Amino acid sequence: MSKIKVTLGIDIGGTNTVFGLVDEDGKCIKYTKIPTLGNNSAESLFSRLFEDLHKNFSKELESFELVGIGIGAPNGNYYKGTADNPPNLNWGFVNLRELVSEYYDIQVAVTNDANAAALGEMIFGAAVGMKNFIEITLGTGLGSGIVVNGELVYGSDGLAGELGHTTAKTGGRRCNCGLKGCLETYVSAPGIKRTVFKLLSVKKDESPLRKIAFEDLNSKMIYEAALEGDQIALQAFDETAHTLGSALADVVAILSPEAIIFFGGLANAGDLLLKPTKTYMEENLLPMYRDKVKILKSGLPEDEAAILGAGALIWHEINRY
Amino acid sequence: MSKIKVTLGIDIGGTNTVFGLVDEDGKCIKYTKIPTLGNNSAESLFSRLFEDLHKNFSKELESFELVGIGIGAPNGNYYKGTADNPPNLNWGFVNLRELVSEYYDIQVAVTNDANAAALGEMIFGAAVGMKNFIEITLGTGLGSGIVVNGELVYGSDGLAGELGHTTAKTGGRRCNCGLKGCLETYVSAPGIKRTVFKLLSVKKDESPLRKIAFEDLNSKMIYEAALEGDQIALQAFDETAHTLGSALADVVAILSPEAIIFFGGLANAGDLLLKPTKTYMEENLLPMYRDKVKILKSGLPEDEAAILGAGALIWHEINRY
């Protein structure tokens, strides 16, 4: 009897690296995490990772057939198999595909986490059967993975899909990337926090948020305040939705996707964010696009999504032709 | 000896419809035009068109083998083969593919003029060998055709690629489409005229443009005034380039194309428009995209481009697999 095939999905984060085995039906058979320790080299991360794998996954590696390794990494470049000077990791430019190939002589593919999430969504999640959609990850930043004609859009250099760094407001908020007014300075967990502080400065409403220092405030507190009817928090969600909805209308005019799918912490705010976002998006659409584009929440389980996405990268390669 | 194969390229414009035979090397063997007479039906246009074709192209239709008919039409929908309520034509929704199939039992494909131009560019023009680029047509509007992974982006409904209706300025100029602040209200022949009139109202510079009524001014006059050093005209080009460059930076962040290629009347302003556009685009790019994206002028001969693009639509279908 032939063994069931699995892929190894690896998601490299600023703090932790999670990895696990993913079968063709999107079942995450087993997974674990290790600290990324971004001040050390990529070599040392993968040395620890494969040591852990051999120690703790030995039974699974015997009973299943490992057919490929998919890696989601910050600034992951699909064409080159590299991570290009990833922020928060002291790596510079490093070829992860070559590095991993030293451990296993099987297919290895690399992309960034949002692209991996998009593939996971297409193969296992809310985008099954879709050929044109956009995955948006909302967390400390705004990432995006774009699927056109059933394929990820990598662009000419493997680095496409940075919707978070399109300009939401000319000359607006300073972004980590060096530019100003980037969408993610408004629409992300830190973005909505900045909006709250702007509103606290502009408005006179009483609010429990006035008791919390900038460094102590997080998006969950804003969400909870909004659920309690706090006007500052509610308006912060509304302004965030307005900025996001306008940006999505532009993306729809360019790509005409079937759906826009949200994943990650802030996306869990659900109706508080996504419902007004859809309304603002529709207001800014050409008539011919109206009432067509679905706004959806991810269909991937949150704790396994990054691994499923990275694992899907290989399943997509294998099943493409 | 087998006959040389040709496609019939048809470009339907608001005033004239041009059509001609295109061989596989992008040679336009013969072409002509007839008035579109947009108040009449699409049926009557094609009846006149094929009558003209049989009368005037009879020799060519005998010596070549006609393998397909490609149509560039306003609001042309590739998936459905329709023109969906095209502006300036009193047609409503009409299925051009079915209509033309009554005359010829060969492959028929329909898209809009900017998409056809993009395919023409990829097969015969400045984008030969490119897999990821954007074609922008600048004229009375701003049209765009987007190529990703060597295929046109039609989106989920066949209507993708309306870069001209992304928002350049929130709450800005009123657009024909019903929205406000659309990119084409700033970047197009009428757009730069509107900018000139804004500048005439704001500034005190003397200018020959102060002698010309709104309805009499055209973009060629603005171009010529700029060449003479007129400050109003020069600033109008600079503002147009600034708006366009910022919009292109957003598109690059989303799609990371190899090149952005300009076609049409206003694109002929060349260095006056495209050079500062590139500068403003670069200023707004994430560092990882800088100094990579080419800004090019179309490689298609202007008078034949629309026919070559429509003809290319069929060549692309035939040679795809």
Image (cartoon, coloured by chain):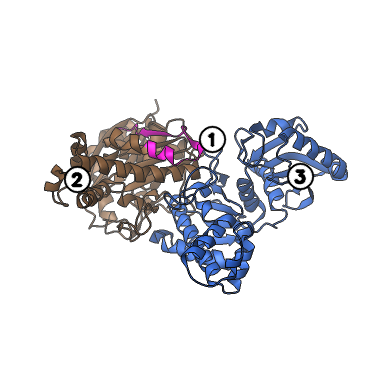
Chain colours: A blue, B brown
Nearer-N-terminus badge (3/1): 3
Q: Secondary structure at mark 3?
A: strand
Q: Does B284 appear in magenta?
A: yes
Residue B120 seen from this side: no
Badge 2 vs badge 1, beta-carbon distance below 8 Å = no
The residue at which mark 1 appears reads as A157
Q: What number is the disc on residue B267?
A: none
Q: Secondary structure at mark 2?
A: loop
Chain bearing tag 2 is: B
Asked if badge 3 and badge 1 are on a common chain, one would say yes
Q: Secondary structure at mark 1?
A: loop
Say which amino acid is labelled 1: Asp
| Closer-to-camera residue (B317/A165) | A165
Q: Position of residue A157 (x, y in %)?
A: 54, 35
Q: Residue at x 30, y 41 (%)?
A: B238
Crowding at label 3, few (<14), some or many (≥20) Cα neighbours within 10 Å?
some
Image vertical order of residue B268 relative to residue B201, above or below: above
The residue at which mark 2 appears reads as B218
Q: Residue at x 66, y 32 (%)?
A: A94
Q: CA distance from mark 3 to mark 1?
A: 30 Å
